[in-house]
Amino acid sequence: MSETGNKLRKLLESPNFDPQNYVKHLSQQSDGDRDLQEHRQKIQNLADETAQNLKKNVYKNYRQFIETAKEISYLESEMYQLSHILTEQKGIMESITQALLSADKDETSKEMQAAFPKETEELKQRTLTSLLEKVEGAKNIMDSPGRHLVYNGDLVEFDVDNMSPVQKVHAFLMNDCLLIATWLPNRRGAVKYKYNALYELESFAVVNVKDNPPMKDMFKILMFPDSRIFQAENSKVKKEWLEILDETKKNKVSKDTHKKEEEVPTSPVRAEVSTNPFDVEDEPMGAEESVDLSLEWIQELPEDLDVCIAQRDFEGAVDLLDKLNEYLKDQPATQRVKELRLKVEERVRQLTEVLVFELSPDRSLRGGPKATRRAVSQLIRLGQSTKACELFLKNRAAAVQTAIRQLRIEGATLLYIHKLCNIFFTSLLETAKEFEMDFAGNTGCYSAFVVWSKSAMRMFVDAFSKQVFDSKESLSTAAECVKVAKEHCQQLTEIGLDLTFTLQSLLVKDIKAALQSYKDIIIEATKHRNSEEMWRRMNLMTPEALTKLKDEMRGCGISFQQYTGDDCWVNLSYTVVAFTKQMMSFLEEGLKLYFPELHMVLLESLREIILVAVQHVDYSLRCEQDPEKKAFIVQNATFLHDTVLPVVERRFEESVGKPAKQLQDLRKSTRPVRINPESTTSLV
């Protein structure tokens, strides 16, 4: 920029710049309108330069923004993985700590029981009796022999749905049950609580609730189909509740198991009298006892399944189910086995519902196909391969649709199509590979994947056509876009999936309409040029323009040398040359779009375009009286018939692999007849 321009820029950028004073001062110093016009031009140039710099800065910052967004996305993914690892390590440390504390407590308890066995039991029973006297409606609880108090304390119950406080309660943990009593607002003497609920220890599971301020120091009691959440006074009290509940439940299971083992050898032999008419004589009478369900892991199986589901340990839950099925595989279906299976089947239903929710499209779709592998694999192990296949494909369809919807529509159509194809076909390829990995042993699901692929292709074609064909892009742009889509579609063949025919069948309607529309444009342009035809030689004015025209014709495969001389004149009319260039361009773009369903459409379009030019030449020959112009028209007709039409036929046949019979018939029917110029000359 000149020195004057720099001074003007500094003046306008100064913080104390006053537009009104500047204009007033400028008008006083100007000699006339010319000075003001020059100054106005300087300001306009400065404004244009500023706008250009602004555009460059916006583009530069936009690129930086995209790169920053990518870095943030990568960082977010890494932080998510780090958080997951820390959570797992925290869980492991907590389980180790609880195991060590439980072991120490067991040792201390055994030592105390060994030192004061009878006194401790009697003291606990007396303590329980005195406490239950304060509970209204709990008189019959002490009727059970051997029942004594283990632990008790105040808790606050919260609503499971909205996590709001419900009521204050007092919990009494006994050696075989858990009593929940609510506080009485109006006390009556020694009575402070009112009976609320009594739960057998084997009827519920205890789950730790992670702290989420202000909701902290909580644990959950799971009793199918209900659950209750309680909050302890502090973290220490919560920890004591969890440890003592777990220890008491284990002691109860161990005691019941030991009791059953002692009863088996002393049970009397039953007489050989059966009320079952289907009993077989050689079947042992103790068939009910032949299945040993007293193992500790079987007794705790329903509770362990509840805990695994609550902690989202899906693999652990399915492992337990597989272990149970393997154990009961060859065992008789006794009544106790049936009852156990009913309990387990209810947990299987809950586990299936959780896994189905994991695969629902409402969940986050950010992890890609691999994020669904965990839930899919567990559903397949549960024998739900059909449901897993359906949910996996629905999840991926929602992910693909979301990715296409979030794609920014650029001003350049070809750039948008490149991004669209890259997103769609990459997602389809990743989905296919993940599907093949997850459902390798379920060949029956492959047909569902093929159907899903076709529906996904329809979604892609809708977005593709809306941008390419509905926006009335040029035929060359449409051809390039279709070419890009075909190339990306070919990538799927590496995994044995060929959707080229599906893509073509979905695009045929739009491509056919585009070809016919562009054909109509060429015909209208040709007719317009024909109406202004003067049948004069073409003068290109400069050698460079002539060289450029020769290169264009050579690129089309047309021999053009014989129609040019040393000067800038061409022995053809402007109309015929323009028609030739436009038709050859239409042919090349049409061949890029070609597939078998469009064979007749492309041929008929070419035939109609050529016929317009031929009819114009024939009409001109019949009407022209000047012998020189008539000879010039014959020369143009010869160029079309002997040079252009054979090139069109040959190029079509080379690309398609079939002869263009309609074009051959047209060329034969329009063969020019060369006679004395003084007589009538026409195309027959």
Image (cartoon, rainbow, N blue to C red):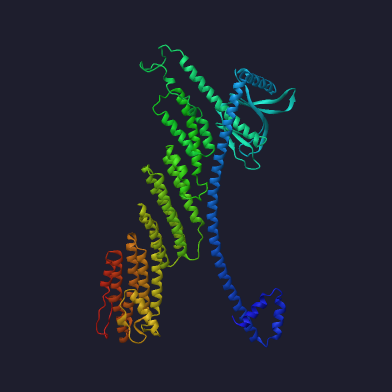
**Is residue 429 depicted above or below 278 in this figure?**
below
Residue at image position (36%, 43%) is 443
104 horizontally vs 487: left or right: right
> Can the viewer see residue 497 in this picture?
no
Looking at the rendering, in which quadrant would you find the C terminus? bottom left
Give 395 or 237, whichever is nearer the viewer: 237
Quarter where residue 583 is shown: bottom left
Give 105 or 26, whichever is nearer the viewer: 105
Point out residue 72 in the picture as x, y percentages from the top left corner. Answer: 55, 56
Residue at image position (50%, 20%) is 260
Point out residue 130 in the picture as x, y percentages from the top left corner. Answer: 69, 21
> Can the viewer see residue 585 in this picture?
yes
**Is residue 401 depicted above or below 9 in this figure?**
above
Residue at image position (27%, 85%) is 677
Quarter where residue 558 is shown: bottom left
Give 205 or 259, whichever is nearer the viewer: 259
Quarter where residue 107 is shown: top right
Give 96 or 227, whichever is nearer the viewer: 96
Point out residue 160 in the picture as x, y percentages from the top left corner. Answer: 61, 36
Instruction: Report the number of discs.
Output: 0
Looking at the rendering, in which quadrant would you find the N terminus? bottom right
**Is residue 363 depicted above or below 323 in this figure?**
below
Point out residue 62 in the picture as x, y percentages from the top left corner. Answer: 55, 64
Q: Residue furthest bottom?
A: 31
**Is residue 615 depicted above or below 432 in this figure?**
below
